[in-house]
Amino acid sequence: MDEALDSLSQQLKVGDVIEISIIDRDFFPGQTVEIPIACKHLTKYNLFLYFHPHRLNLEYIGSGDDTDNEWLTLVIDHLEINDLRRGYIATYDEEKSWSNQLVAWEKIGSSADPI
């Protein structure tokens, strides 16, 4: 098991808030979402953070021509972390078609923080 991911898994708690920033080149950069962790699962090579279904409207760049941009509504299912700053979110659309997007992430709130 990766010691860094094991340590990270111990630091992240259910209820902690994660900020996810899209860095996938198919989407307009800088789009972010804040979402609390619903549960987590550590494997030998990855840490998975699962969330309650959360809709996210993303501006899709596509071919790179601004006139072709469109908005996609995706539901975030989970974040697969394979290093300490980046990972992939697994999302699905209205037709239940699954995709992965490269993201940067960081913990921005603790489950122990007062409301």
Image: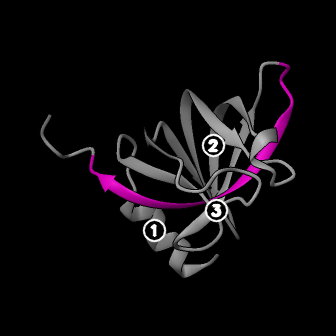
Badge 1: few (under 14), some or many (20 or more) residues near its Cα, within 10 Å? some
Under mark 3, the amino acid is Gly
Which of pointers 3 and 1 indicates the residue nearer the eye?
A: 3
- Label 2 residue SS: strand
Query: In terms of image quadrants, where is residue 23?
Result: bottom right
Pick whichever of labels 3 and 1 is earlier in the sequence.
1
* CA separation in Å, label 3 and label 1: 13 Å
**Which residue, given by chain and number where applicable, does mark 3 sit on?**
87
**Which residue, given by chain and number where applicable, does mark 1 sit on?**
8
Mark number, residue 78: 2
* CA separation in Å, label 1 and label 2: 16 Å
Q: Which residues are magenta?
A: 95-110
Q: Position of residue 4 (x, y in %)?
A: 52, 79
Magenta span: predominant SS is: strand
Q: Left or right of 16: which side holds 8?
A: right
Q: Position of residue 66 (x, y in %)?
A: 74, 47
- Label 3 residue SS: strand
Q: Residue at x 83, y 36 (%)?
A: 98
50 drawn magenta: no
Under mark 2, the amino acid is His
- Label 1 residue SS: helix
Q: Nearer the viewer, residue 65 or 44?
A: 65
Under mark 1, the amino acid is Leu
